[in-house]
Image: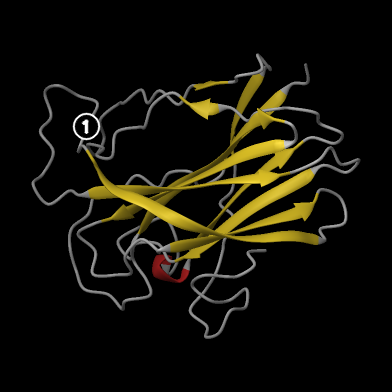
């Protein structure tokens, strides 16, 4: 089976939330995850998970998410899926340290967006993408963080007959203690038994504060 590289591209922005008020289009994203599972007969279950700061006065989790499916070489848009939101689920304020109690104002929630799509084997493969803006204004290692969105992507290999992407085994703690060493497990399981490699990469920007449905809007449809 082919080796698989699991890119950690802005899947998580682990934040200590200190409060504040922000416009309704911004300052709510914590991170996300985009995976797929082959269910047979060229059918794939696509699963998007979006994490939100639930103490934010920014946008709520969207009722529908736009997921774009592109040709893996030409970038031609093949499908622009509108996927309904599942239940909103609170994420426990786990610190990863039994001696550290999370502050009471920490709150993260998430929702799953799941759909089934027919994707026959394609010589150039597929690129699947989701974009949303914007991130929390309290992030200190980005300039103008509430102008930054996120892009999540995953690939289905060329001429793939039935392959599934790696699946995360757990979620990392949502609270970090300043200057404290912490070992965060970011392990995955690959249903096909493929080899997995992990890399830290630059963030992919995604979306913006523009109007309409273009690439510079909070919810690009289709995503780039």
Q: Residue furthest right?
A: 123
Image quarter in which the N terminus is found: top right
Q: Position of residue 25 (x, y in %)?
A: 38, 75
- Residue at horizontal 58 percent and vertical 70 percent from the top: 220
Q: Residue furthest bottom?
A: 211
Q: Is residue 187 above or below residue 16?
A: above
Q: In terms of depth relative to the viewer, which is nearer, 107 or 67?
A: 67
- Residue at horizontal 52 percent and vertical 74 percent from the top: 208
Q: Position of residue 178 (x, y in %)?
A: 24, 39
How many numbered discs, if any? Answer: 1
Q: Position of residue 93 (x, y in %)?
A: 20, 38
Q: In terms of depth relative to the viewer, which is nearer, 102 or 211?
A: 211
Image quarter in which the C terminus is found: bottom right
| Residue that numbered label 1 is attached to | 95
Q: Position of residue 185 (x, y in %)?
A: 40, 23
Q: In terms of depth relative to the viewer, which is nearer, 71 or 202?
A: 71
Q: Is residue 223 above or below residue 190?
A: below
Q: Is residue 97 toward the left or the right of residue 129 in the image? A: left
Q: Is residue 81 toward the left or the right of residue 187 in the image? A: right
């Amino acid at each position: 089976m082919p080796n698989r590289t699991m890119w950690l591209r802005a899947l998580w922005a682990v934040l200590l939330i200190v409060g504040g008020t922000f416009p309704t289009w911004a300052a709510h994203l914590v991170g996300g995850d985009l995976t797929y599972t082959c269910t047979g007969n060229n059918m794939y279950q696509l699963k998007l998970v979006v994490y939100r700061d639930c103490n934010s006065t920014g946008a709520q989790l969207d009722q529908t998410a736009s997921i774009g499916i592109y040709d893996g070489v030409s970038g031609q848009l093949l499908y622009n899926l509108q996927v309904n939101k599942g239940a909103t689920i609170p994420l426990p304020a786990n610190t990863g340290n039994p001696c550290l109690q999370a502050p009471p104002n920490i709150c993260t929630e998430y929702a799953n967006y799941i759909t089934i799509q027919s994707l026959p084997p394609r010589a150039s493969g597929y690129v699947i993408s989701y974009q949303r803006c914007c991130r929390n204004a309290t992030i200190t290692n980005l300039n103008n963080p509430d102008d930054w969105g996120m892009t999540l992507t995953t690939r289905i290999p060329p001429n793939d007959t039935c392959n599934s992407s790696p699946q995360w085994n757990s979620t990392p703690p949502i609270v970090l203690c300043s200057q404290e060493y912490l070992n965060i497990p970011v392990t995955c399981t690959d249903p096909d038994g493929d080899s997995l490699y992990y890399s830290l990469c630059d963030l992919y920007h995604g979306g913006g504060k523009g109007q309409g449905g273009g690439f510079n809007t909070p919810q690009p449809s289709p995503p780039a």
